[in-house]
Protein backbone atom coordinates (compact mmCIF):
# COMPACT_ATOMS: atom_id res chain seq x y z
CA UNK A 1 0.00 0.00 0.00
CA UNK A 2 1.25 3.46 -0.74
CA UNK A 3 0.13 6.95 0.08
CA UNK A 4 1.21 10.36 -1.01
CA UNK A 5 3.62 11.91 1.46
CA UNK A 6 2.70 15.05 3.35
CA UNK A 7 2.32 17.77 0.77
CA UNK A 8 5.32 19.96 0.17
CA UNK A 9 5.92 22.77 -2.27
CA UNK A 10 7.34 20.03 -4.49
CA UNK A 11 3.84 18.54 -4.73
CA UNK A 12 2.46 21.88 -5.83
CA UNK A 13 5.27 22.22 -8.37
CA UNK A 14 4.41 18.74 -9.58
CA UNK A 15 0.83 19.85 -10.28
CA UNK A 16 1.96 23.03 -12.02
CA UNK A 17 4.53 21.18 -14.12
CA UNK A 18 2.00 18.54 -15.12
CA UNK A 19 -0.57 21.20 -16.01
CA UNK A 20 1.81 23.23 -18.16
CA UNK A 21 3.05 20.08 -19.90
CA UNK A 22 -0.52 18.95 -20.54
CA UNK A 23 -1.49 22.33 -22.01
CA UNK A 24 1.49 22.12 -24.34
CA UNK A 25 0.88 18.49 -25.32
CA UNK A 26 -2.90 18.63 -25.70
CA UNK A 27 -3.94 22.21 -26.53
CA UNK A 28 -7.55 21.08 -27.04
CA UNK A 29 -7.80 20.38 -23.32
CA UNK A 30 -6.63 23.86 -22.30
CA UNK A 31 -10.08 25.11 -21.17
CA UNK A 32 -10.55 22.03 -19.03
CA UNK A 33 -7.06 22.24 -17.55
CA UNK A 34 -7.48 25.94 -16.86
CA UNK A 35 -10.77 25.23 -15.10
CA UNK A 36 -9.69 22.32 -12.90
CA UNK A 37 -5.99 23.22 -12.55
CA UNK A 38 -6.48 26.02 -9.99
CA UNK A 39 -8.91 23.80 -8.07
CA UNK A 40 -6.35 20.98 -7.88
CA UNK A 41 -3.65 23.41 -6.78
CA UNK A 42 -5.81 24.97 -4.08
CA UNK A 43 -6.89 21.56 -2.86
CA UNK A 44 -3.22 20.56 -2.57
CA UNK A 45 -2.52 23.71 -0.55
CA UNK A 46 -5.37 22.90 1.83
CA UNK A 47 -4.17 19.31 2.13
CA UNK A 48 -0.74 20.60 3.04
CA UNK A 49 -2.09 22.40 6.09
CA UNK A 50 -4.86 19.95 7.02
CA UNK A 51 -4.48 18.31 10.44
CA UNK A 52 -4.58 14.65 9.47
CA UNK A 53 -5.87 11.93 11.78
CA UNK A 54 -5.89 13.36 15.30
CA UNK A 55 -7.69 10.51 17.02
CA UNK A 56 -6.07 7.61 18.86
CA UNK A 57 -4.11 4.99 16.99
CA UNK A 58 -6.60 2.44 15.73
CA UNK A 59 -6.59 -1.14 16.77
CA UNK A 60 -6.77 -3.01 13.50
CA UNK A 61 -7.70 -6.66 13.48
CA UNK A 62 -5.19 -8.00 10.95
CA UNK A 63 -7.31 -11.04 10.15
CA UNK A 64 -10.45 -9.02 9.46
CA UNK A 65 -8.39 -6.55 7.47
CA UNK A 66 -6.99 -9.37 5.41
CA UNK A 67 -10.55 -10.48 4.68
CA UNK A 68 -11.50 -7.05 3.36
CA UNK A 69 -12.62 -5.07 6.43
CA UNK A 70 -11.00 -1.71 5.62
CA UNK A 71 -9.67 0.62 8.31
CA UNK A 72 -12.70 2.86 8.77
CA UNK A 73 -14.97 -0.19 8.96
CA UNK A 74 -13.05 -1.20 12.07
CA UNK A 75 -13.33 2.05 14.01
CA UNK A 76 -15.52 2.16 17.11
CA UNK A 77 -17.22 5.42 16.35
CA UNK A 78 -19.28 4.98 13.28
CA UNK A 79 -16.87 4.09 10.54
CA UNK A 80 -16.16 7.50 9.11
CA UNK A 81 -13.42 10.05 8.84
CA UNK A 82 -12.96 12.43 11.77
CA UNK A 83 -15.25 15.40 11.78
CA UNK A 84 -13.61 18.22 9.87
CA UNK A 85 -16.66 20.51 9.78
CA UNK A 86 -15.05 23.24 11.94
CA UNK A 87 -12.37 23.67 9.30
CA UNK A 88 -14.73 23.91 6.36
CA UNK A 89 -15.80 27.59 6.60
CA UNK A 90 -12.16 28.69 6.42
CA UNK A 91 -11.51 26.29 3.56
CA UNK A 92 -14.60 27.62 1.78
CA UNK A 93 -13.19 31.17 1.93
CA UNK A 94 -10.23 30.11 -0.21
CA UNK A 95 -11.66 27.30 -2.32
CA UNK A 96 -15.07 28.69 -3.34
CA UNK A 97 -13.67 31.88 -4.98
CA UNK A 98 -11.20 29.72 -6.92
CA UNK A 99 -14.04 27.49 -8.07
CA UNK A 100 -16.16 30.51 -8.96
CA UNK A 101 -13.38 31.83 -11.22
CA UNK A 102 -12.84 28.41 -12.78
CA UNK A 103 -16.52 27.62 -13.34
CA UNK A 104 -18.28 30.88 -14.31
CA UNK A 105 -21.51 29.02 -15.09
CA UNK A 106 -22.02 28.21 -11.40
CA UNK A 107 -20.19 31.22 -9.97
CA UNK A 108 -23.41 32.81 -8.77
CA UNK A 109 -24.48 29.67 -6.95
CA UNK A 110 -21.05 29.33 -5.36
CA UNK A 111 -21.25 32.92 -4.14
CA UNK A 112 -24.67 32.16 -2.66
CA UNK A 113 -23.26 29.05 -1.03
CA UNK A 114 -20.35 31.03 0.44
CA UNK A 115 -22.78 33.57 1.87
CA UNK A 116 -24.91 30.80 3.39
CA UNK A 117 -21.84 29.34 5.08
CA UNK A 118 -20.75 32.75 6.41
CA UNK A 119 -24.20 33.64 7.72
CA UNK A 120 -24.66 30.29 9.38
CA UNK A 121 -27.68 29.46 7.22
CA UNK A 122 -25.71 26.38 6.24
CA UNK A 123 -24.01 24.90 9.29
CA UNK A 124 -20.52 23.42 8.95
CA UNK A 125 -21.96 20.05 10.00
CA UNK A 126 -24.57 20.15 7.22
CA UNK A 127 -21.88 21.24 4.77
CA UNK A 128 -19.70 18.27 5.77
CA UNK A 129 -22.75 16.01 5.39
CA UNK A 130 -23.30 17.34 1.88
CA UNK A 131 -19.67 16.59 1.15
CA UNK A 132 -20.33 12.95 1.93
CA UNK A 133 -23.46 12.79 -0.20
CA UNK A 134 -26.18 13.69 2.30
CA UNK A 135 -29.16 15.57 0.94
CA UNK A 136 -28.95 19.21 2.04
CA UNK A 137 -30.88 22.15 0.65
CA UNK A 138 -29.61 25.69 0.27
CA UNK A 139 -31.90 28.21 -1.44
CA UNK A 140 -30.42 29.39 -4.71
CA UNK A 141 -27.96 26.52 -4.97
CA UNK A 142 -28.75 23.45 -7.03
CA UNK A 143 -28.19 20.05 -5.39
CA UNK A 144 -25.58 19.22 -8.04
CA UNK A 145 -23.56 22.37 -7.39
CA UNK A 146 -23.83 21.93 -3.63
CA UNK A 147 -22.69 18.33 -3.84
CA UNK A 148 -19.78 19.24 -6.13
CA UNK A 149 -18.59 22.15 -4.01
CA UNK A 150 -19.02 20.37 -0.67
CA UNK A 151 -17.24 17.23 -1.81
CA UNK A 152 -14.32 19.35 -3.07
CA UNK A 153 -14.23 21.13 0.30
CA UNK A 154 -14.01 17.97 2.39
CA UNK A 155 -11.63 16.20 0.04
CA UNK A 156 -8.31 17.77 1.21
CA UNK A 157 -9.11 16.87 4.82
CA UNK A 158 -10.21 13.36 3.90
CA UNK A 159 -7.06 12.79 1.87
CA UNK A 160 -4.81 14.05 4.65
CA UNK A 161 -6.51 11.83 7.25
CA UNK A 162 -6.33 8.85 4.90
CA UNK A 163 -2.60 9.37 4.59
CA UNK A 164 -2.16 8.82 8.33
CA UNK A 165 -4.59 5.92 8.43
CA UNK A 166 -2.93 4.14 5.53
CA UNK A 167 0.40 4.39 7.34
CA UNK A 168 -1.12 2.34 10.19
CA UNK A 169 -1.75 -0.64 7.90
CA UNK A 170 1.02 -0.34 5.36
CA UNK A 171 2.64 -3.63 6.48
CA UNK A 172 -0.60 -5.62 6.30
CA UNK A 173 -1.52 -7.53 3.15
CA UNK A 174 -4.48 -6.21 1.17
CA UNK A 175 -5.78 -8.06 -1.87
CA UNK A 176 -9.09 -6.32 -2.37
CA UNK A 177 -10.20 -3.99 -5.14
CA UNK A 178 -11.71 -1.47 -2.72
CA UNK A 179 -9.75 1.07 -0.70
CA UNK A 180 -8.07 -0.34 2.43
CA UNK A 181 -8.74 2.92 4.29
CA UNK A 182 -12.26 4.01 3.40
CA UNK A 183 -13.63 1.22 1.22
CA UNK A 184 -13.99 3.50 -1.80
CA UNK A 185 -13.78 2.28 -5.39
CA UNK A 186 -10.75 3.14 -7.55
CA UNK A 187 -11.08 5.71 -10.31
CA UNK A 188 -7.45 5.58 -11.38
CA UNK A 189 -4.53 3.19 -11.42
CA UNK A 190 -0.83 3.57 -11.98
CA UNK A 191 2.02 1.25 -12.91
CA UNK A 192 5.16 2.11 -10.98
CA UNK A 193 8.60 0.67 -11.45
CA UNK A 194 9.93 -0.91 -8.32
CA UNK A 195 13.41 -0.01 -7.16
CA UNK A 196 15.25 -3.29 -7.38
CA UNK A 197 18.42 -3.84 -5.39
CA UNK A 198 19.02 -7.29 -6.82
CA UNK A 199 21.83 -8.08 -9.24
CA UNK A 200 19.48 -9.72 -11.69
CA UNK A 201 17.56 -8.55 -14.73
CA UNK A 202 14.93 -6.08 -13.66
CA UNK A 203 11.29 -6.12 -14.65
CA UNK A 204 10.26 -3.15 -16.76
CA UNK A 205 6.53 -3.37 -16.38
CA UNK A 206 6.07 -2.02 -12.88
CA UNK A 207 3.58 -2.90 -10.18
CA UNK A 208 -0.04 -1.90 -10.43
CA UNK A 209 -1.53 0.41 -7.83
CA UNK A 210 -5.20 1.29 -7.64
CA UNK A 211 -6.11 4.78 -6.41
CA UNK A 212 -9.16 5.51 -4.31
CA UNK A 213 -11.73 7.88 -5.79
CA UNK A 214 -12.61 9.15 -2.31
CA UNK A 215 -9.34 9.54 -0.37
CA UNK A 216 -6.62 8.97 -3.04
CA UNK A 217 -4.99 6.17 -1.05
CA UNK A 218 -3.06 3.85 -3.34
CA UNK A 219 -2.75 0.12 -2.88
CA UNK A 220 -1.04 -2.63 -4.80
CA UNK A 221 -3.30 -4.87 -6.84
CA UNK A 222 -2.91 -7.86 -9.09
CA UNK A 223 -1.88 -6.53 -12.47
CA UNK A 224 -3.70 -8.89 -14.83
CA UNK A 225 -7.16 -8.78 -13.31
CA UNK A 226 -10.35 -6.77 -13.47
CA UNK A 227 -10.83 -4.87 -10.20
CA UNK A 228 -14.59 -4.97 -10.73
CA UNK A 229 -15.28 -8.68 -11.30
CA UNK A 230 -11.92 -10.35 -10.68
CA UNK A 231 -11.69 -11.72 -14.22
CA UNK A 232 -8.13 -12.86 -15.01
CA UNK A 233 -8.67 -14.16 -18.53
CA UNK A 234 -6.20 -12.33 -20.78
CA UNK A 235 -8.62 -12.63 -23.72
CA UNK A 236 -11.26 -10.69 -21.81
CA UNK A 237 -9.00 -7.93 -20.47
CA UNK A 238 -8.34 -5.07 -22.86
CA UNK A 239 -6.00 -2.10 -22.87
CA UNK A 240 -7.56 0.75 -24.79
CA UNK A 241 -5.17 3.54 -25.68
CA UNK A 242 -4.23 6.25 -28.11
CA UNK A 243 -0.98 5.16 -29.83
CA UNK A 244 0.25 8.74 -29.61
CA UNK A 245 -0.01 8.62 -25.81
CA UNK A 246 0.91 5.01 -25.18
CA UNK A 247 1.54 5.52 -21.46
CA UNK A 248 -2.13 6.35 -20.91
CA UNK A 249 -4.64 3.56 -21.18
CA UNK A 250 -8.01 2.34 -20.04
CA UNK A 251 -7.91 -1.16 -18.56
CA UNK A 252 -11.28 -2.58 -19.55
CA UNK A 253 -12.98 -5.91 -18.97
CA UNK A 254 -15.21 -7.32 -21.68
CA UNK A 255 -16.84 -9.67 -19.17
CA UNK A 256 -18.30 -7.05 -16.81
CA UNK A 257 -17.84 -3.98 -19.03
CA UNK A 258 -16.02 -2.05 -16.31
CA UNK A 259 -12.85 -0.03 -16.81
CA UNK A 260 -10.31 1.88 -14.80
CA UNK A 261 -7.87 4.44 -16.19
CA UNK A 262 -4.21 3.52 -15.96
CA UNK A 263 -1.04 5.59 -16.17
CA UNK A 264 2.02 3.52 -17.07
CA UNK A 265 4.93 5.43 -15.56
CA UNK A 266 7.63 2.91 -16.47
CA UNK A 267 8.92 5.03 -19.33
CA UNK A 268 8.21 8.47 -17.91
CA UNK A 269 11.04 10.78 -16.91
CA UNK A 270 8.88 12.52 -14.30
CA UNK A 271 5.84 11.18 -12.50
CA UNK A 272 3.02 13.64 -13.17
CA UNK A 273 0.43 14.55 -10.58
CA UNK A 274 -2.14 11.78 -10.86
CA UNK A 275 -5.17 14.07 -10.79
CA UNK A 276 -3.73 16.06 -13.68
CA UNK A 277 -2.88 12.80 -15.44
CA UNK A 278 -6.48 11.63 -15.04
CA UNK A 279 -7.66 14.99 -16.38
CA UNK A 280 -5.55 14.59 -19.50
CA UNK A 281 -7.04 11.13 -19.96
CA UNK A 282 -10.57 12.52 -20.27
CA UNK A 283 -10.69 12.00 -24.07
CA UNK A 284 -9.67 8.38 -23.53
CA UNK A 285 -12.26 8.03 -20.79
CA UNK A 286 -14.97 9.38 -23.08
CA UNK A 287 -13.96 7.05 -25.91
CA UNK A 288 -13.98 4.08 -23.56
CA UNK A 289 -17.48 4.97 -22.36
CA UNK A 290 -18.60 5.29 -25.97
CA UNK A 291 -17.50 1.70 -26.50
CA UNK A 292 -19.91 0.59 -23.79
CA UNK A 293 -17.66 0.42 -20.74
CA UNK A 294 -18.39 2.01 -17.37
CA UNK A 295 -15.83 3.36 -14.89
CA UNK A 296 -15.55 1.79 -11.45
CA UNK A 297 -15.73 5.30 -10.03
CA UNK A 298 -15.82 8.76 -11.53
CA UNK A 299 -13.69 11.88 -11.34
CA UNK A 300 -15.34 15.26 -10.75
CA UNK A 301 -14.92 15.99 -14.46
CA UNK A 302 -16.09 12.60 -15.70
CA UNK A 303 -19.62 13.75 -16.39
CA UNK A 304 -18.56 16.65 -18.59
CA UNK B 1 15.32 21.43 -12.32
CA UNK B 2 18.54 19.98 -13.80
CA UNK B 3 18.62 16.29 -14.56
CA UNK B 4 21.39 13.78 -14.11
CA UNK B 5 22.33 10.21 -14.93
CA UNK B 6 23.86 7.78 -12.51
CA UNK B 7 25.68 5.07 -14.45
CA UNK B 8 26.39 2.33 -11.98
CA UNK B 9 29.07 0.29 -13.73
CA UNK B 10 29.02 -2.25 -10.91
CA UNK B 11 25.64 -3.36 -12.27
CA UNK B 12 26.59 -3.23 -15.96
CA UNK B 13 26.87 -6.60 -17.71
CA UNK B 14 27.92 -5.05 -21.04
CA UNK B 15 24.83 -6.33 -22.80
CA UNK B 16 25.07 -3.19 -24.99
CA UNK B 17 21.33 -2.74 -24.89
CA UNK B 18 21.86 0.97 -24.23
CA UNK B 19 24.26 1.28 -27.17
CA UNK B 20 21.85 -0.41 -29.56
CA UNK B 21 18.78 1.41 -28.24
CA UNK B 22 20.53 4.75 -28.74
CA UNK B 23 21.22 3.89 -32.37
CA UNK B 24 17.70 2.58 -32.87
CA UNK B 25 16.06 5.70 -31.46
CA UNK B 26 18.27 7.98 -33.54
CA UNK B 27 17.73 5.74 -36.56
CA UNK B 28 21.45 5.43 -37.18
CA UNK B 29 22.76 2.86 -39.65
CA UNK B 30 25.30 0.17 -38.88
CA UNK B 31 28.92 1.27 -39.17
CA UNK B 32 31.86 -0.63 -40.62
CA UNK B 33 33.87 -2.10 -37.80
CA UNK B 34 36.80 -4.40 -37.22
CA UNK B 35 37.88 -7.01 -34.76
CA UNK B 36 40.72 -5.66 -32.69
CA UNK B 37 40.95 -8.31 -30.04
CA UNK B 38 38.10 -7.22 -27.83
CA UNK B 39 34.34 -7.48 -27.60
CA UNK B 40 34.18 -3.67 -27.77
CA UNK B 41 32.39 -2.90 -30.97
CA UNK B 42 32.78 -0.52 -32.70
CA UNK B 43 36.26 0.34 -31.47
CA UNK B 44 35.34 3.94 -30.64
CA UNK B 45 32.52 6.46 -30.62
CA UNK B 46 31.50 7.52 -34.12
CA UNK B 47 29.08 9.99 -35.64
CA UNK B 48 26.59 7.10 -35.60
CA UNK B 49 27.50 5.82 -32.13
CA UNK B 50 26.81 8.35 -29.40
CA UNK B 51 26.97 5.64 -26.79
CA UNK B 52 29.61 2.93 -26.59
CA UNK B 53 30.12 0.22 -24.00
CA UNK B 54 33.86 0.07 -23.55
CA UNK B 55 35.44 -3.22 -22.54
CA UNK B 56 38.68 -3.11 -20.59
CA UNK B 57 40.69 -6.11 -19.48
CA UNK B 58 43.54 -5.96 -17.04
CA UNK B 59 45.47 -8.45 -14.95
CA UNK B 60 45.59 -8.12 -11.19
CA UNK B 61 47.36 -10.68 -9.01
CA UNK B 62 47.10 -13.27 -11.74
CA UNK B 63 43.38 -12.70 -12.21
CA UNK B 64 41.83 -11.11 -15.26
CA UNK B 65 39.43 -8.28 -14.46
CA UNK B 66 37.01 -7.15 -17.10
CA UNK B 67 35.56 -3.70 -16.64
CA UNK B 68 32.64 -2.27 -18.59
CA UNK B 69 32.12 1.43 -19.17
CA UNK B 70 29.04 2.73 -21.04
CA UNK B 71 30.72 5.85 -22.42
CA UNK B 72 28.76 8.93 -23.46
CA UNK B 73 28.73 12.71 -23.23
CA UNK B 74 28.88 13.86 -19.58
CA UNK B 75 26.76 16.98 -20.18
CA UNK B 76 29.21 18.97 -18.06
CA UNK B 77 27.73 21.57 -15.77
CA UNK B 78 30.22 24.17 -17.03
CA UNK B 79 30.83 22.56 -20.39
CA UNK B 80 34.31 23.26 -21.83
CA UNK B 81 32.99 22.63 -25.35
CA UNK B 82 30.42 25.35 -24.85
CA UNK B 83 33.12 27.67 -23.58
CA UNK B 84 35.24 26.81 -26.60
CA UNK B 85 32.45 27.42 -29.07
CA UNK B 86 33.13 30.22 -31.53
CA UNK B 87 29.77 30.12 -33.31
CA UNK B 88 26.85 31.58 -31.38
CA UNK B 89 24.05 29.07 -31.05
CA UNK B 90 26.16 26.13 -32.23
CA UNK B 91 26.48 24.64 -28.77
CA UNK B 92 23.73 25.39 -26.32
CA UNK B 93 22.70 24.31 -22.87
CA UNK B 94 19.09 23.39 -22.25
CA UNK B 95 18.48 25.03 -18.90
CA UNK B 96 15.49 22.83 -18.06
CA UNK B 97 17.51 19.64 -18.18
CA UNK B 98 21.16 20.67 -18.24
CA UNK B 99 21.65 18.90 -21.59
CA UNK B 100 24.47 20.23 -23.77
CA UNK B 101 23.21 20.21 -27.34
CA UNK B 102 25.04 20.67 -30.61
CA UNK B 103 22.86 22.37 -33.18
CA UNK B 104 22.85 22.64 -36.95
CA UNK B 105 25.21 25.60 -36.63
CA UNK B 106 27.92 23.29 -35.29
CA UNK B 107 28.93 22.60 -38.89
CA UNK B 108 30.58 26.04 -38.81
CA UNK B 109 32.60 25.21 -35.71
CA UNK B 110 36.26 24.25 -35.76
CA UNK B 111 35.89 20.54 -34.96
CA UNK B 112 39.44 20.12 -33.68
CA UNK B 113 38.94 22.90 -31.14
CA UNK B 114 35.66 21.49 -29.89
CA UNK B 115 36.95 17.95 -29.66
CA UNK B 116 40.14 18.97 -27.92
CA UNK B 117 38.13 21.06 -25.45
CA UNK B 118 36.26 17.99 -24.29
CA UNK B 119 38.01 16.35 -21.35
CA UNK B 120 36.27 13.07 -22.17
CA UNK B 121 36.97 12.97 -25.95
CA UNK B 122 33.31 12.73 -26.90
CA UNK B 123 32.51 14.96 -29.93
CA UNK B 124 32.63 13.45 -33.40
CA UNK B 125 32.03 14.97 -36.81
CA UNK B 126 29.49 13.68 -39.27
CA UNK B 127 31.36 13.71 -42.61
CA UNK B 128 28.11 13.97 -44.58
CA UNK B 129 26.38 16.80 -42.75
CA UNK B 130 29.61 18.36 -41.38
CA UNK B 131 27.84 18.74 -38.05
CA UNK B 132 29.59 17.98 -34.79
CA UNK B 133 27.54 15.36 -33.01
CA UNK B 134 27.23 13.56 -29.70
CA UNK B 135 24.62 12.41 -27.17
CA UNK B 136 21.88 15.01 -26.71
CA UNK B 137 20.39 13.40 -23.57
CA UNK B 138 17.47 12.31 -25.81
CA UNK B 139 16.16 15.84 -25.50
CA UNK B 140 13.26 15.00 -27.82
CA UNK B 141 12.16 12.23 -25.47
CA UNK B 142 12.69 14.34 -22.36
CA UNK B 143 10.50 17.09 -23.76
CA UNK B 144 7.80 14.44 -24.14
CA UNK B 145 8.45 13.36 -20.51
CA UNK B 146 10.05 10.09 -21.59
CA UNK B 147 13.24 8.61 -20.18
CA UNK B 148 16.37 8.71 -22.35
CA UNK B 149 16.48 5.62 -24.52
CA UNK B 150 19.56 4.11 -22.85
CA UNK B 151 17.91 4.37 -19.44
CA UNK B 152 14.64 2.92 -20.64
CA UNK B 153 16.48 -0.02 -22.13
CA UNK B 154 18.93 -0.90 -19.38
CA UNK B 155 17.86 -4.27 -18.01
CA UNK B 156 20.27 -4.33 -15.10
CA UNK B 157 19.52 -1.03 -13.38
CA UNK B 158 22.94 0.35 -14.30
CA UNK B 159 21.45 3.38 -16.06
CA UNK B 160 19.49 5.70 -13.80
CA UNK B 161 18.03 9.10 -14.61
CA UNK B 162 16.16 11.77 -12.70
CA UNK B 163 16.45 15.02 -10.80
CA UNK B 164 20.08 15.76 -10.07
CA UNK B 165 19.42 15.94 -6.33
CA UNK B 166 17.79 12.49 -6.42
CA UNK B 167 20.63 11.02 -8.46
CA UNK B 168 23.22 12.42 -6.03
CA UNK B 169 21.37 10.72 -3.18
CA UNK B 170 21.16 7.46 -5.11
CA UNK B 171 24.85 7.75 -6.02
CA UNK B 172 25.86 8.15 -2.37
CA UNK B 173 23.70 5.19 -1.37
CA UNK B 174 25.05 2.93 -4.08
CA UNK B 175 28.63 4.01 -3.42
CA UNK B 176 28.32 3.01 0.22
CA UNK B 177 26.97 -0.39 -0.83
CA UNK B 178 29.57 -1.05 -3.53
CA UNK B 179 32.45 0.09 -1.33
CA UNK B 180 31.70 -2.72 1.09
CA UNK B 181 32.94 -5.18 -1.53
CA UNK B 182 35.16 -2.88 -3.60
CA UNK B 183 36.98 -0.39 -1.36
CA UNK B 184 38.31 1.52 -4.37
CA UNK B 185 34.80 2.30 -5.60
CA UNK B 186 34.26 5.96 -6.41
CA UNK B 187 32.04 8.46 -8.18
CA UNK B 188 33.69 10.20 -11.12
CA UNK B 189 33.77 14.00 -11.39
CA UNK B 190 30.45 14.09 -9.58
CA UNK B 191 30.41 17.83 -8.94
CA UNK B 192 31.21 18.76 -12.53
CA UNK B 193 29.03 16.57 -14.71
CA UNK B 194 25.44 15.50 -15.26
CA UNK B 195 26.44 11.95 -16.09
CA UNK B 196 27.89 10.50 -12.92
CA UNK B 197 29.73 7.20 -13.13
CA UNK B 198 30.10 4.83 -10.23
CA UNK B 199 33.16 2.63 -10.79
CA UNK B 200 34.34 -0.18 -8.55
CA UNK B 201 38.03 0.12 -9.37
CA UNK B 202 40.56 2.77 -10.37
CA UNK B 203 39.09 4.85 -13.24
CA UNK B 204 42.08 4.15 -15.48
CA UNK B 205 41.18 0.45 -15.47
CA UNK B 206 37.92 1.33 -17.24
CA UNK B 207 38.81 3.90 -19.87
CA UNK B 208 41.52 6.42 -20.61
CA UNK B 209 38.99 9.25 -20.42
CA UNK B 210 36.83 7.90 -17.62
CA UNK B 211 37.71 10.97 -15.60
CA UNK B 212 38.46 14.44 -16.91
CA UNK B 213 42.06 14.71 -17.96
CA UNK B 214 42.08 18.48 -18.09
CA UNK B 215 42.27 19.32 -14.41
CA UNK B 216 45.32 21.42 -13.69
CA UNK B 217 45.90 23.03 -10.35
CA UNK B 218 48.28 25.59 -11.84
CA UNK B 219 45.46 27.32 -13.67
CA UNK B 220 43.10 29.97 -12.50
CA UNK B 221 40.82 28.78 -9.69
CA UNK B 222 37.73 27.00 -10.96
CA UNK B 223 39.06 26.74 -14.49
CA UNK B 224 40.52 23.69 -16.17
CA UNK B 225 43.43 23.85 -18.54
CA UNK B 226 41.19 23.10 -21.49
CA UNK B 227 38.68 25.73 -20.48
CA UNK B 228 41.46 28.26 -20.10
CA UNK B 229 42.91 27.44 -23.51
CA UNK B 230 39.47 27.37 -25.06
CA UNK B 231 38.74 30.78 -23.56
CA UNK B 232 42.04 32.22 -24.72
CA UNK B 233 41.68 31.09 -28.31
CA UNK B 234 37.96 31.68 -28.62
CA UNK B 235 38.22 35.38 -29.69
CA UNK B 236 40.79 34.48 -32.36
CA UNK B 237 38.56 31.77 -33.72
CA UNK B 238 35.54 34.08 -33.72
CA UNK B 239 37.52 36.59 -35.80
CA UNK B 240 38.61 33.84 -38.18
CA UNK B 241 35.00 32.61 -38.44
CA UNK B 242 33.73 36.08 -39.24
CA UNK B 243 36.38 36.54 -41.92
CA UNK B 244 35.39 33.21 -43.43
CA UNK B 245 31.72 34.14 -43.30
Image: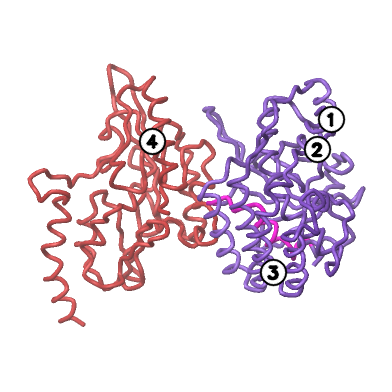
Whole-percent x, y for residue B91 in the image = 30, 66
Marked residue nearer the N-terminal end (2 or 1): 1
Of circles 4 and 1, which is in front? 1
Disc 1 on helix, strand or loop?
A: loop
Labels 3 and 2 in the same subunit: yes
Subunit that carries the residue with mark 2? A
Point 51% across, 50% down: residue:
A9
Instruction: Write the residue at 80% across / 29% down.
Output: A75
Circle 1 residue? A68
Mark 2 or mark 1, which is nearer to you? Answer: 2
Q: Position of residue A285 (x, y in %)?
A: 78, 60
Q: Which residue is mark 3?
A: A100
Distance from disc 2 to disc 1, alpha carbons, whole Å, reads 16 Å
- On the image, the x and y values in percent for residue B40 come to 38, 41
- Which mark is first along the chain, 2 or 3? 2
What is the letter of the red chain?
B
Q: From mark 4 to mark 1, how far is it between C-alphas?
A: 50 Å
Which residue position is annotated with label 4? B68
Q: Label the purple chain with its letter.
A: A
Amino acid sequence: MQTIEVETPAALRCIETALSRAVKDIPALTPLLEAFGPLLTERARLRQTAPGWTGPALSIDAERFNQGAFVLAQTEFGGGFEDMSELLPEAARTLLPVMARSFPAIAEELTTLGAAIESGALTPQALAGAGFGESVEVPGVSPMTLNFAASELVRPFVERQAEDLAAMVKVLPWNQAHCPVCGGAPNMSVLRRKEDESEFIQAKGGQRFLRCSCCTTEWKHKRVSCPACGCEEPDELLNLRDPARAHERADACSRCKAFVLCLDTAELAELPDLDVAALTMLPLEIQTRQQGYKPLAEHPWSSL
Amino acid sequence: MPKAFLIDTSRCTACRGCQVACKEWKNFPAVPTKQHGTHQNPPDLTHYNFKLVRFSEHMENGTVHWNFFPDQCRHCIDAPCLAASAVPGAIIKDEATGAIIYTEKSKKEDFASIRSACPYDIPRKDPKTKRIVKCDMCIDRLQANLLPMCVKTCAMGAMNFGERSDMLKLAAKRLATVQQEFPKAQLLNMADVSVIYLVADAPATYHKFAVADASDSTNAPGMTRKEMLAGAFSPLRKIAQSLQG
